[in-house]
Amino acid sequence: MKKLRSAMMMRKSIFAAAAVLLLGGCGSAGSSQPAASEDSTAAAATSSPAVQEESSPQPSATPEPRITASEEIEYTFPADREDWRLELYSEETAGEKTYRIRVYDGQGELQQDIPCNIKAPGLRLRWGELYTYADLAVFPEDAQTAGTAGLLFLWDSEAGGFQERAVRIPWYDEAYGDGTFLVTDIQEDVEERTLCCVVPGSFRTAELRKWTLKKDGGPTAKGELLIWDCLEKMSLYNGKVEWDDSGELVNNTYYEELFRERLKYPWDTAAPDEIPVIIAVRDEEDNWDWSKGTYESREAFLADCGFGDAEPFYQYCDRLQNLELELYLDEGADKCCGFCYSYDYDLELKKVVRCSGFLLDGFTAAAWEEEALSFYGEKETEVPEDSEVPEGSETPEDSPMSVTCVYRDDGTLYCKHYRHDPMIFGTAGQTGDIYYDEMGRPVYRYEYITHGSLQSYYIYSGKSKRPRYGLCLDWNGEDPIPEMTVYR
């Protein structure tokens, strides 16, 4: 059998495999064992490209299938199976050809024999792109141009092999290693891009967000863009757009931000029965007393905190209009309580809401300075002379830190993204984001820290440029430890 010896790449390598060896019989199926990684193309016999459903058992009079071995798929198995191999076979019965994927151990014993029911004159294999290096996607060879779907065989790390039930998956242009992938369909004057994901454990895919860009078809470089969140069933952007002289979409950074950021992914989750709360009380000697508990309802917690009949002092919603923070405030007593909300989707794509509560008795006073919004390392212009990057680590090619600003169509600042190299400046605060309202005022800040994250909310009175309050929630696991600052 001819072996393919191309250089191993994690993404987008292709091989052409011709049927070269005639074998008799099918071989017996074995236990689940390892599989493949990268991009390949295997050519076989003729038929129309299409993914086929599992065929029903054939009558005993059906001729025995003829199985032909294609070239071995070169693949690096785990260290304890480095002498194993993966092969693709074509299977022809009564003039119809499909395929099989076989895994052999170091002694040549068949460990796994998986039917791959795709009818096509050739196949294209891709792996190492979705979840793990071993997930194997198999497409008809013309899937990229014909838009034909394929089959995805997920890697089962516990069993050490492929899950033999395949996921039907559209041809994708990019994959991001977390189960999400991008599907693009470009017609004459319409570009449609869809961010999708593989729904864990369900053997199906789901659409997360959709981008539909229409050109007006006239002499002017104008069009319309709709960015749609498929889970929330709402528009994130719907308006006119323009192209510049080089053919680039004007303000594309903003549109890509709306399209790609803050995606929600379905996973195996359920809403908790109770609301976890954390209580922080400062005594006269400036010492803090911390306690934790749970409540059956928001109303019960509000009543115990002395806010039973109060209206929310402040509410913050994310860009999907989900309530994220609900704050109750007693200004005269320097006391507040509130709720933090987070949102997920379960495997049935139903929305799941989580709620955590906090009580804070004791505020801190401070002067407001714009410098308070500087990230750690943001003002540095050079890498510290005494910093050392461990050998073999990767540093950014352009700079050890960066600040990216994104603007709305009207020129107002929408958000600022920060990152620095953790090998140089440490892991605390290595990434951060600040979001601004239409008046250019910071309203929300997120910052990564080693044990979790810091989330800060800036609260204003009327059109004041200076916030009246700043609430910081230090997320240590599932506990939002609160700190309230009164700005002078």
Image (cartoon, rainbow, N blue to C red):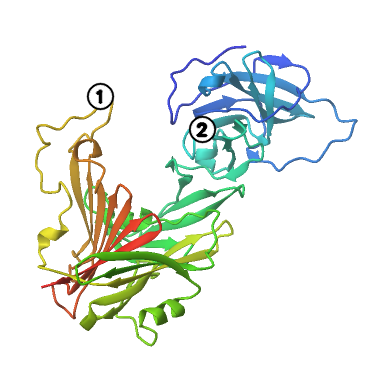
Residue beneath label 2, please? 126
Judged left or right of residue 56, residue 312 is left
Q: Residue furthest front?
A: 285
- Res 18 seen here: no
Q: Mark 1, residues whose alpha carbon is within 10 Å: few (<14), some, or many (≥20)?
A: few
- Front one among 462 and 245: 462
Residue 169, quarter of picture: top right
Judged left or right of residue 150, residue 416 is left
Judged left or right of residue 329, residue 324 is right
Q: Residue 432, position in %: x, y?
A: 25, 52
What's the mark number on residue 391? 1
Precedes in sequence: disc 1 or disc 2: 2
- Front one among 438 and 68: 438
Q: Are marks 1 and 2 in contact (CB under 8 Å)?
A: no
Q: Is residue 258 above or below residue 302?
A: above
Q: Residue furthest bottom?
A: 309
Q: Mark 2, residues whose alpha carbon is within 10 Å: few (<14), some, or many (≥20)?
A: many
Say which residue appears at 18% left-offset and 71% top-offset.
439
Q: Is residue 103 above or below residue 219?
A: above
Q: Residue 165, position in %: x, y?
A: 66, 40
- Res 278 seen here: yes
